[in-house]
Amino acid sequence: MKLCIVGIGGCGGHLVESFLKNQDVTLLKKSLGDHVSFGGVKGLWLEADVQETDNQNFFGSLDRGCYPGFFIPHDVIGSESKTSKLIVDRYGYDVKKQGFMRQAEFLKAVFEIFDSDEDVKRTALSEHESENPILRAAWDQIRPYTTLAGQKDNNGGSEMCDGILFIVSLGGGTGTGFVNPITRYIRGERPAYPVFVLGVLTEEGVDPQQRAKEAKRDLGATISMYDLITKKVGVGVDGVIMIDNQIMVEKFGQDYSAIDDYIHQAMRPFVAGRHYPGEDPPSLAMREKFVEGLDRPPILVPCYHREKRRKDPEENLVKKALSEGRLFGCDPGKAERAYVFTRGFMDLDEIVRAVAMYTGLSEERIEPWRKLGENHMDEILILLRNPYGEERGCEVKGNLEYRLHRVIRMALKYMNDPESNLVAEGMPDLTRRAIEDYFYGEDGIQERLKESLLRIERGEKPFFLNERNIFQRTSRDSGIFEPHRSGSRRVDDEEVRRIVEDEVGRILAERGL
């Protein structure tokens, strides 16, 4: 599987730079040939803040034909846009605001409006030839790097990527808000196309780069994880690879360049090409392994280790990866499955045996893929699927439940902070009621997160259940939204017909007809 690497937001941009660095010979920063990145991956950076793109010198503007390039999707909305004016007038959201807004719910709300408000869709379609021009513009930049573009090389094969890996920070900024809408948009074209997200959970305390409170960042992370994990397979992503920056900071301090390089190194077995002969499965077959038996995307915890080549390396690599190389705290013994990627000369049976021994998984639940290595080094990446589910595991430091239980509690704390300003003053009544209901309603996120804490404490999977929107269309003709109502649901024509027939039948029976 060759991946298109798409960084979203500031953290995503820094990380995708590590993946897209030129492996070709360069002279005075100019390549002497084609730009060739490790594993042959392609990619780009999506950003919403022009200033962020000015403060770096790796990416050029895709609008100017540069590669690797950055793209600002909301620039497709002009300053005099009728679409933008309609959204501002009706909902109070300014999609042209520089860098968007960093409130957790902003981008979620905006793209739900584009999805379902018929007036907005008609206006956008007439003005931009797309019902959702921001997402369309972003996908138009990503799609040419994928096999969906249909391009072939000179030998009749495709040099394009047959999967996508989005890289975001789970911290409440652009990446947090944009990754869910864009993945859902892609699914509208190709439900089975492999799409993964690598999400970096920011460290505890104040973010030294954004100066944002931990609780505020945790709310953004919680909303993003909730939306990612509750979307059905084929609608959302195929897996969320979680990395805890708290572990990275404890390992490297606040040397974020070193952290980025290490995360890239750890993911190399996943993105690398050069499978063993006869062991390069189609990307769709690999995707099926990740979601097999699930109706919701899994959490995937990466465990990584590398060392100089030695005799019988399999058991030692597996042991070190699972004990010392976890990039998110977890109990490997709670994993449902393990997906193993190696680079170097490995024995397939020994890999499976060692993973089974140190995780307790049956061999049928272990999927290994071997790739050729380099420089006399062996390395292994083990992705553990949903490694949680212990009753009171949230009380065990180092468990996945422990970290996420804290994140969700901090999110709830921020929701009830008078200074959070989640329901902003001056918003139209429609938006104000919708936001209030989304956060604090009878079936709002606050109640759902409280339930998720109980599920974590009881050791239940999954801990997030059903998707929750901010806006709910009440009439297929009106194009106007009202807040979601607890217990309400859309009744379609077929159900209306059945209800009417049942009622008529009951009345006729009562009258003996």
Image: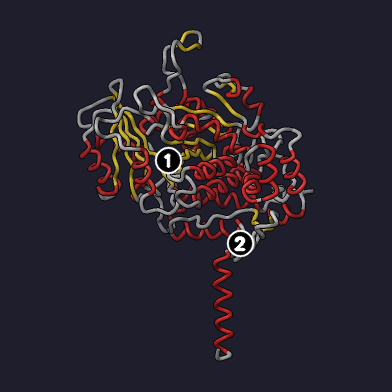
Q: Evaluate whether residue 440 shows in this view.
A: no
Residue tagged by mark 1? 194
Q: Position of residue 462 (x, y in %)?
A: 45, 55
Q: Residues within 10 Å of mark 2 (few under 14, many from 20)?
A: some
Q: Number of labelled discs?
A: 2
- Circles 1 and 2, Cβ within 8 Å, touching? The answer is no
On screen, 10 above or below 176? Answer: above
Does residue 243 appear to the left or right of 292 in the view shown? right
Q: Position of residue 346 (x, y in %)?
A: 23, 32
- Whichever of labels 1 and 2 marks the residue nearer the N terminus, that label is 1
Residue, far bottom: 512
Residue tagged by mark 2? 443
- In this rendering, which labeled residue sits more in front, label 1 or label 2? 1
Please tell me whether mark 2 sits on a helix, a strand or a loop: loop
Please tell me whether mark 1 sits on a helix, a strand or a loop: loop
Three-letter code, disc 1: Pro
Q: Residue at x 57, y 86 (%)?
A: 508
Q: Residue at x 40, y 39 (%)?
A: 302
Nearer to me, 171 or 410 = 171
Q: CA distance from mark 1 to mark 2?
A: 32 Å
